[in-house]
Image (cartoon, helix red, strand yellow):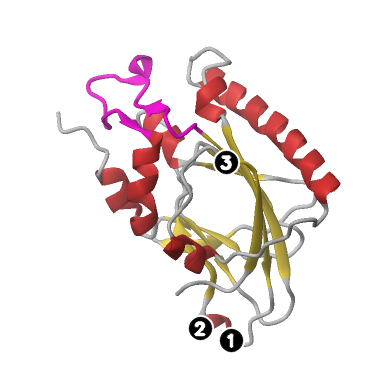
Amino acid sequence: NIGLKSQFDTGKKVTPPPPPEFFLLFGFLSTKNLCREVVATYTIEAKKLGLRILELVSEGLGLESRFFGDKLSESEILSINHYPPCPDPSLTLGVAKHCDPNLLTLLHQGDVSGLQVFNNGEWIGVEPLHNVFVVNIGNQLQIISNNKLKSVEHRVVTNSRVARTSAGFFIGPSEDSIIEPEKSLVDDAPFYRAFEFKDFLLHYFPNLEDNEVVMGHFKSQA
């Protein structure tokens, strides 16, 4: 299931480019001059909001407010996704199930539902609310918090009636960032080993529909 949508991305991409199969899954649309000024302004403001949320998350975990600053939040990508109506939504998803590989995601759903999260063995629809962002915790935040925060498995379903457009803003580490559980958040033993973020992405993309396989590869052997 490769999904039904078109997409363009912009932002400070400091991580390695994903392999070709990633674009088969998520779709791709080149938009060289589309809404350049609006997109640039949106990106700046979304980054400010994301960093402020990360400051609050840091304080909630008992860390310094700037803990997730600098290299841990250096990468930024704005992804605009357009999902056309699908005559038979049972045949395809907009985006297959996955957890985000980054640190934090801000999603603006627009006014058409489609996002679903997996909870207690079932898929639950997340209805869009006016002027509200959905905030997704990514895999790196789960690892750094030593499982105190959990990434959320989600997908996008299609519908046969109306098109849907969403904007996802992804904040993540630089490719050479060392990711590991923060020592002050480890009670007995860390759940994960240390690794470079670029190594995580190399393992993530071939396995992104199975988060247990993705995260299991980086678990501590102690």
CB atoms of marks 2 and 3 within 8 Å: no
Residue at 66% of width from left, 58% of height from top?
Answer: 8
Q: Which residues fall within the magenta stretch?
A: 173-196
Residue 59, visible in the rendered structure:
yes
Q: Residues within 10 Å of mark 3 (few under 14, many from 20)?
A: some
Mark number, residue 13:
3
Q: Secondary structure at mark 2?
A: helix
CB atoms of marks 2 and 1 within 8 Å: yes
**Please, what is the three-letter code of the amino acid marked with disc 2?**
Leu
> Which corner quadrant holds the C terminus?
top left
Q: Nearer the viewer, mark 3 or mark 1?
A: 3
Q: Nearer the viewer, mark 2 or mark 3?
A: 3
Residue at 60% of width from left, 21% of height from top?
Answer: 55
Of marks 2 and 3, which one's residue comes earlier in the chain?
3
Q: Is residue 75 left or right of residue 165?
A: left
Mark number, residue 91:
2
Residue at 71% of width from left, 67% of height from top?
Answer: 164
Per the image, the residue denoted by label 1 is 88
Residue 9: image x %, image y %? 64, 53
Q: Is residue 180 magenta?
A: yes
Looking at the image, the residue that sits furthest to the bottom is: 87
